[in-house]
Amino acid sequence: MYMMLRYMKVTETSGSVKLWKYTLDGNVETLKEKVEIDEANKLVSLTALEGSHVLEKYKSCKIIFQVTPKSEGGLVKITLEYRRLNENDPPPHKYIRFFGQCHSRY
């Protein structure tokens, strides 16, 4: 899998909307997402609003990052919630790997 993503540090607040442009498996894709932050539960969720590829096969797509503090650092649980447009469409494995790679880089 080939993945390229430019990383920009941005200040996010709950309700922020971001537009991403990235290359995945040789295809340039875009994604507009809404950020929701729940500081009490140490949770950040990103909900797809528009996208050149993601929303062509999925009715909805939401990634959730939840941090569990540990004595040294913490543990991040990544959950991807999605609904297929067609039951025959495959699960979004390439996006799961993509988000995991993005997270491990930064």
Image (cartoon, helix red, strand yellow):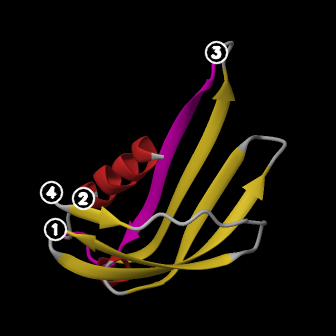
> In the rendered structure, which amino acid carries the disc numbered 4?
Met
Q: Are marks 2 and 1 in contact (CB under 8 Å)?
A: yes
Earlier along the polypeptide chain: callout 1 or callout 3? 1
Q: Is residue 38 left or right of residue 26?
A: right
* Distance between the alpha carbons at the discs numbered 3 and 2: 31 Å
Main secondary structure of the magenta stretch: strand
- Write down the quadrant of residue 2 in the picture: bottom left
Q: Are marks 3 and 4 in contact (CB under 8 Å)?
A: no
Residue picked out by circle 1:
25
x and y percentages locating residue 49 in the rendered image: 54, 82
Residue picked out by circle 4:
1
- Write down the quadrant of residue 46 in the picture: bottom right
Residue picked out by circle 2:
94
Residue 49 seen in this snapshot: yes
Q: Is residue 58 left or right of residue 73?
A: left
**Count of numbered marks:** 4
Earlier along the polypeptide chain: callout 2 or callout 1? 1
Residues packed near mark 4 inside 10 Å, few (<14), some (14 to 19) or many (20 plus): few
Helix, strand, or loop for circle 1? Answer: loop
Helix, strand, or loop for circle 4? Answer: loop
Residue picked out by circle 3:
72
Residue 35 lies, with reference to residue 32, above or below; the image says above
> In the rendered structure, which amino acid carries the disc numbered 1?
Asp
Q: Are marks 1 and 3 in contact (CB under 8 Å)?
A: no
Q: Tell me the residue at 63%/23% (across/down).
A: 73
Q: Are marks 1 and 4 in contact (CB under 8 Å)?
A: yes
